[in-house]
Image (spheres, grey):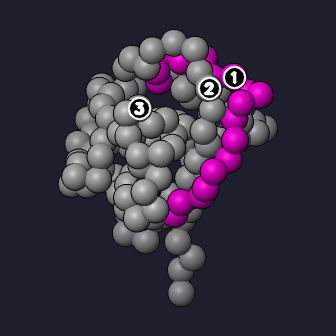
């Protein structure tokens, strides 16, 4: 029995008017949570600050970062059985999010945008809708 590959990522959860900030990279169709993979030796918080600056031009304040949940789902665009484990954080940032680098587009999703979202984002949208947190967070 083969052990599935697990890709570890960090993500920033930002809600704006009850809608979840999401990004789409060049060459992809689905939207993902903004963030990425930690570099060797980086903490999750350091990786998140770096990734959000690179992808969105937002400077996150490390003192405000708070882990809120960890999600695991099938990895989009990877071989069957590959999982992505996403460590999700909230936190305050300076700057207005705008696509940079590998990011082609940003949007704000609600539960009705399920078909446009990656498996991890779908899982988060479901969880937020079930708990009502999408409107209060």
CA distance for labels 3 and 2: 12 Å
Residue to which mark 2 is pinned: 92
What span is colored magenta in the figure?
55-72
**Does residue 27 appear left or right of residue 39 in this picture?**
left
Q: Position of residue 107 (x, y in %)?
A: 30, 31
Element at label 2: loop
Residue to which mark 1 is pinned: 61
Residue to which mark 3 is pinned: 16
CA distance for labels 3 and 1: 18 Å
- 132 lies above or below 28: below
Q: Which residue is painted at 53% across and 80% down in the image?
A: 2
- Kindly report which numbered mark, 3 or 1, lies closer to the viewer in this rendering: 3
Q: Are marks 3 and 1 in contact (CB under 8 Å)?
A: no
Q: Are marks 1 and 2 in contact (CB under 8 Å)?
A: yes
- 92 lies above or below 24: above
Magenta stretch encompasses residue 98: no
Q: Which residue is painted at 47% across and 24% down in the image?
A: 55
**Does residue 28 appear left or right of residue 102 in this picture?**
left
Element at label 1: loop
CA distance for labels 1 and 2: 6 Å
Element at label 3: strand
- Foreground residue, 50 or 22? 22
Q: Position of residue 122 (x, y in %)?
A: 35, 57
Q: Position of residue 61 (x, y in %)?
A: 69, 22
């Amino acid at each position: 029995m083969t052990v599935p590959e697990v890709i570890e990522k960090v993500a920033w959860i930002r809600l704006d008017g009850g809608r979840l900030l999401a990004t789409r990279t060049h060459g992809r169709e689905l939207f993902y949570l903004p963030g990425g993979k930690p570099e060797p030796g980086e903490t999750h918080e350091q990786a998140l600050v770096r990734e959000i600056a690179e992808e969105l031009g937002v400077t996150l304040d490390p003192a405000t970062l708070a882990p809120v949940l960890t999600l695991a789902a099938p990895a989009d665009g990877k071989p069957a059985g590959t999982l992505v484990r996403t460590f999700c954080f909230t936190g305050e940032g300076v700057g207005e999010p705008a696509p940079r680098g590998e990011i082609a587009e940003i949007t704000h999703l609600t539960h009705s945008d399920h078909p446009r979202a990656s498996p991890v984002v779908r899982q988060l949208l479901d969880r937020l809708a079930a708990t009502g947190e999408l409107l209060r967070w």
